[in-house]
């Protein structure tokens, strides 16, 4: 028992940079307290003392704010970080070395007794804050569930699930995309000086916008467009500012509009140089201001 407690404290000390000492973890980490109380409640549950197990688990809920049914099975070195609002159902199974953040629900969508209603997390799964995993399916080993994701179907091993409803991002998709990009590098964009020399020739196409919009839509038939799981996943739901495909689309449109506006402005100046007065002339767009408004 003491060896298992030492494992639990060590895993928390390794995964949480805020942990300063092992005694602090033992005294001040509700996730550890919830796991220890659950092991007592689960032992009573397995022996058929159901009411006693529920009473112990209820005391743990009052003390820690983490609700774990005594029938749930939890492996070794499971870290519930912060933990407030975590709910783990009766038939849930959590493998070794999993990490669960606050507000996570491992729940069910069916009300039939005696069947597998809650999910199974295999080894090394990370579940982000506020995520909901609902149903009696399996989340594969070392998969990652993004913050506030709603997962209602199985997640393959090593994959990342993000969004509501969750879309699955497979690591091999990103690898294949990177390989194809390395084999056929995209042509370099034309320099700005060339565009200034040819003000009436536009090389802009809508294809980049279509690709960005396709990435922003959930794919109901299968995995989403290739993306980097490391960039998509964030346990607290905070990513880079330029991760949103719709924001990228707006920036592309703003830049294209600014280019066209500059060309029209140069044409107006050329016509005025030839003696033709141009009415209602406008100043070029303030691109930086528009981009800040989008962000």
Image (tube, rainbow, N blue to C red):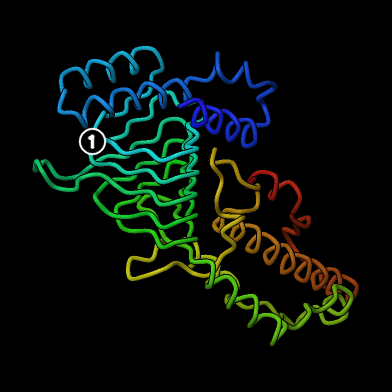
Seen as rendered, the residue at the extreme bottom is 184
Q: Position of residue 92 (x, y in %)?
A: 29, 42
Disc 1 packing (10 Å; few <14; some 14–19; many ≥20)? some
Residue 68 drawn at (x, y percent): 31, 28
Quadrant location of residue 76? top left
Using the rendered view, name the quadrant where residue 37 is placed: top left
Residue at mark 1: 90
Name the side, left or right, on which 221 lies relative to 247.
Answer: left
User: At x 54% / y 57%, what residue is drawn?
Assistant: 246
Residue at 38% x, 19% y is 65
- Would residue 149 be found to the left or right of residue 158 on screen? left
Q: Position of residue 33 (x, y in %)?
A: 45, 20
Taking depth in this image into account, of 188 and 166 the one nearest to the observer is 166
Secondary structure category for the residue under label 1: loop
Percent of width and height locating residue 155:
38, 59
Judge from the rendering whether residue 189 lies leftward or rightward of residue 50; answer left or right.
right
Q: Residue at x 45, y 27 (%)?
A: 1
Figure quadrant of the C terminus? top right
């Amino acid at each position: 028992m003491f060896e298992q407690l030492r494992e639990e404290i060590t895993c928390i000390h390794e995964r949480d940079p805020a942990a300063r000492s092992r005694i602090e973890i033992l005294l001040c980490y509700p996730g550890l307290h919830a796991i220890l109380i659950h092991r007592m409640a689960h032992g009573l549950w397995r022996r058929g003392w159901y009411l006693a197990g529920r009473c112990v688990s209820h005391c743990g809920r009052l003390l820690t704010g983490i609700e774990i049914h005594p029938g749930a099975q939890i492996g070794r070195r499971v870290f519930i970080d912060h933990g407030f609002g975590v709910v783990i159902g009766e038939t849930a199974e959590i493998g070794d070395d999993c990490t669960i953040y606050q507000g996570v629900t491992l729940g069910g969508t069916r009300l039939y007794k005696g069947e597998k209603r809650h999910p199974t997390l295999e080894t090394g799964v990370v579940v982000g804050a506020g995520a909901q995993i609902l149903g009696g399916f399996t989340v594969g080993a070392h998969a990652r569930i993004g913050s506030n994701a709603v997962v209602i179907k199985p997640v393959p091993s090593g994959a990342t699930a993000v969004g509501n409803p969750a879309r699955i991002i497979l690591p091999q998709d990103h690898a294949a995309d990177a390989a194809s990009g390395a084999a056929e590098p995209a042509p370099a964009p034309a320099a700005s000086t060339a565009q200034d020399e040819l003000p009436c020739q536009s090389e802009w196409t809508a294809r980049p916008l279509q690709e960005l919009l396709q990435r922003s839509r959930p794919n109901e038939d299968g995995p989403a467009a290739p993306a980097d799981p490391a960039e998509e996943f964030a346990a607290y739901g905070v990513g880079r500012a330029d991760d949103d495909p719709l924001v990228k689309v707006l920036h592309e449109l703003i830049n294209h509009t600014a280019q066209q506006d500059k060309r029209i402005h140069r044409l107006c100046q050329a016509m005025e140089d030839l003696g033709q007065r141009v009415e209602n002339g406008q100043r070029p767009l303030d691109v930086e201001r528009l981009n800040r408004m989008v962000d």
